[in-house]
């Protein structure tokens, strides 16, 4: 087989273009990326060798070596990790294989200055090599295989792959340095970069001596960061480790380093990111926490270790009690792992509670990023759900900032004995829901719940601190019970409900089979009508959500149409109905008002043609010349 040329995936080509042509200031991070990959490769081989020790028999000491050739102007980074086959190289060094890639490429604007910031958040990985090199040659031999492959590219749209030779397993990356990147051929500079970015790497990073007779030099501490004493770790080291382990480039919002001793022993070093990761809302809800056993990396795909609602966490858990040769099957229903999991949840929730009470402003930031994820725990975690609910923050009518439930309860009106809420898809649309009008008029706060997850936990949780949750779109509104002074004064103005009887009777006849009931509303002040769900029926928004996910049979629950007796149109219609009885225009009015109520809910109009004809007729009748 001879050399084959391959095109880079479109996203990679874009990325390379930005990386090489725009002034991405932090060029030195190329070394962090390559050393990080080398360390991952060693971790992966160490794991494979647990079941297949022959793979590392001839060379059991993992290491990463860096060598400088000033004359040839090359920098070489080599590891004795797992290596890559030809196909691995084509797949891994020609695409962005990482999850979240599609979101990443969607967000690329083509405007270099904006994209550089995006890349800063996403990370450039292997391709950062082209920031300092105008040619990169990768020679790799997969552990356990005899043949090697050479990958090379100048970073302009394509790369070449051909068979090669390599004495030992692993990957060697030769960077042909650009003239302006000469500084990275100086040992002092490399020493400094490794100290800054890769000190936490658990494998030795060795700088090969340039001259004969000189000793090779180990540049890093080469002990796993989480095994060191807290007092010996600087914030910068924690941050760098977070970058490595979390493939993230922000500063962690929270760092949690703790050791559990006693019957079961484990160490965890966890981070809450400052910026939400790209894949946070992927339907797989995957966590990326890394599980180690006695310093050996086992997996970063372990559902048993951490619940999905904490998937924003990054970091490692290192257990002393699991066997090293733990298999995937063993991880399921493993009692040790279950203990670690519950310990981890307790610790994390405890830290978050502290922030929620002592550092509210900062906690609000966290909540903005991850609240919608954490809330999944309210219904998924039967043990800790209540704790999560307690620290949860919600948008609420009349409140600038999000509020917690205790504060909401503190502001409840006299006579109010429920926590009122409305759910929907869009916060702004929710704010103008007609069902809120009566509550606003009486100054009663209503929680505005716009996350999809809200409908789910609400279907499980009935109350908080003895106060039931009540949807303002369901059941009677209780508003009469919470009457206040102003409302009483207005009472005299109210058209006596008696006058509405004929109109309601007429609406009921016309809308039979379309609504469950027609009744007078106490929750409306400005709008003529609204729809509500009957007391025992499912909340309108939840039903919509379930239908969208095909979780609910085709049967539609009919809604109740509430009419506002104070609205001028309703008043007129009521008078007309009382005087003249049924008529075509009153029937049209009933149908039109129902369609309107549906439109306000964001529902489609059942029959748009009939709707628009009726509307035109109605307008023609009502506009006098
Ligand atoms: P990431 O590390 O986030 O996956 P990179 O761009 O840094 O992204 O690397 C892409 C992939 O290339 C890695 O996931 C890995 O599969 C492969 N790779 C890179 N460097 C090495 C290496 N030194 N040894 C083995 N595989 C490597
Ligand atoms: Mg990488």
Image (tube, rainbow, N blue to C red):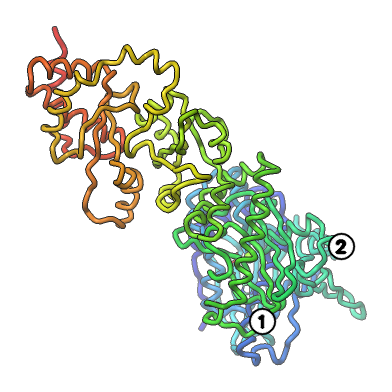
- Residue 514 pos. (x, y %): 17, 39
Frontmost residue, 348 versus 231: 348
Q: Is residue 40 above or below residue 549?
A: below
Side of 378 relative to 52 (left or right): left
Q: Count of labels shown?
A: 2
- Residue 35 pos. (x, y %): 71, 68
Q: Looking at the rendering, which quadrant does residue 530 occupy? A: top left
Residue at position x 80%, y 70% in the image:
68
Residue at position x 42%, y 53% in the image:
460
Which mark is first along the chain, 2 or 1?
1
- Residue 67 pos. (x, y %): 79, 72
Q: Secondary structure at mark 1?
A: helix
Residue at position x 85%, y 60% in the image:
231
- The mark found on residue 201 in the picture is none
Frontmost residue, 514 versus 193: 514
- Residue 495 pos. (x, y %): 26, 15
Q: Quadrant of the C terminus?
A: top left
Q: Is residue 485 above or below residue 263?
A: above
Q: Quadrant of ligand 2?
A: bottom right
- The mark found on residue 188 in the picture is 2
Frontmost residue, 303 versus 586: 586
- The mark found on residue 46 in the picture is 1
Q: Looking at the rendering, which quadrant does residue 288 occupy? A: bottom right
Task: Give the Cα separation between the discs numbered 1 and 2.
Answer: 31 Å
In the picture as drawn, the residue positioned furthest to the right comes out as 213
> Does residue 291 show up?
yes
- Label 1 packing within 10 angstroms: few (<14), some (14-19), many (20+): many
């Amino acid at each position: 087989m001879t050399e084959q040329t391959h095109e880079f995936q479109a996203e990679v080509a874009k990325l390379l273009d930005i990386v090489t042509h725009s002034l991405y200031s932090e060029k030195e991070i190329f070394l962090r990326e390559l050393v990080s990959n080398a360390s991952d490769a060693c971790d992966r081989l160490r794991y494979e060798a647990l079941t297949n020790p022959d793979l590392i028999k001839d060379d059991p000491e993992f290491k990463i070596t860096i060598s400088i050739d000033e004359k040839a102007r090359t920098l070489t980074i080599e590891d004795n990790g797992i290596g890559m086959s030809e196909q691995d190289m084509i797949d891994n060094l020609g695409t962005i294989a990482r999850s979240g890639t599609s979101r990443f490429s969607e967000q690329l604007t083509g405007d270099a200055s904006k994209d550089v910031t995006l890349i800063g958040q996403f990370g450039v990985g292997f391709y950062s090599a082209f920031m300092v090199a105008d040619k990169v040659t990768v020679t790799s031999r997969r552990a356990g295989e005899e043949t090697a492959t050479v990958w090379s590219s100048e970073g302009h749209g394509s790369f070449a792959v051909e068979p090669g030779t390599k004495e030992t397993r692993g990957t060697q990356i030769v960077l042909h340095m650009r003239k302006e990147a000469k500084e990275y051929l100086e040992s002092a500079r490399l020493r400094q970069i490794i100290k800054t970015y890769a000190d936490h790497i658990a494998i030795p990073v060795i700088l090969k001596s340039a001259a004969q007779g000189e000793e090779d030099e180990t540049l890093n501490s080469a002990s796993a960061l989480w095994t060191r004493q807290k007092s010996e770790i600087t914030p910068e080291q924690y941050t760098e480790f977070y970058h490595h382990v979390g493939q993230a480039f922000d500063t962690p919002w929270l760092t949690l380093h703790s050791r559990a001793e006693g019957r079961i022993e484990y160490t965890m070093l966890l981070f809450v990111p400052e910026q939400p990761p790209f894949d946070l809302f992927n339907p797989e809800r995957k966590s990326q926490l890394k599980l180690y056993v006695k310093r050996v990396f086992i997996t970063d795909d372990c559902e048993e270790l951490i619940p999905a609602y904490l998937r924003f966490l990054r970091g490692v858990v290192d257990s002393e009690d699991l066997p090293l040769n733990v298999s995937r099957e063993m991880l399921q229903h493993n009692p040790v792992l279950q203990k670690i999991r519950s310990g981890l949840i307790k610790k994390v929730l405890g830290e978050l509670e502290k922030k929620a009470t002592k550092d509210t402003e900062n906690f609000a930031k966290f909540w903005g990023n991850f609240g919608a994820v954490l809330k999944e725990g309210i219904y998924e975690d039967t043990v800790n759900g209540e704790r999560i609910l307690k620290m949860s923050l919600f948008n609420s009518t009349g409140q600038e900032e999000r509020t917690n439930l205790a504060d909401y309860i503190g502001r409840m009106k006299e006579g109010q004995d429920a926590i009122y809420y409305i759910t929907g898809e869009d916060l702004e649309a929710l704010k103008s829901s007609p069902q809120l009008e009566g509550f606003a008029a009486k100054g009663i706060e209503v929680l505005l719940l716009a996350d999809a997850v809200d409908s789910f936990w609400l279907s499980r949780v009935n109350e908080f601190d003895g106060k039931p949750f009540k949807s303002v779109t369901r059941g009677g509104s209780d508003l009469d019970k919470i009457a206040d002074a102003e409302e009483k004064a207005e009472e005299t103005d109210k058209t006596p409900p008696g006058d509405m009887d004929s109109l309601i009777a007429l609406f009921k006849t016309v809308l039979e089979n379309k609504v469950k009931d027609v009744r007078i509303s106490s929750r409306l002040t400005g709008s003529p009508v609204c729809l509500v769900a009957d007391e025992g029926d499912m909340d309108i928004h939840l039903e919509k959500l379930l239908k969208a996910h095909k979780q609910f049979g085709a049967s539609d629950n009919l809604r109740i149409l509430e009419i506002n007796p104070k609205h001028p149109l309703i008043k007129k219609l009521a008078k007309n109905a009382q005087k003249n009885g049924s008529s075509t225009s009153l029937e049209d009015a009933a149908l039109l008002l129902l369609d309107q109520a549906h439109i306000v809910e964001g529902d489609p109009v059942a029959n748009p043609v009939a709707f628009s004809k009726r509307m035109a007729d109605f307008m023609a009748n009502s506009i006098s010349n």
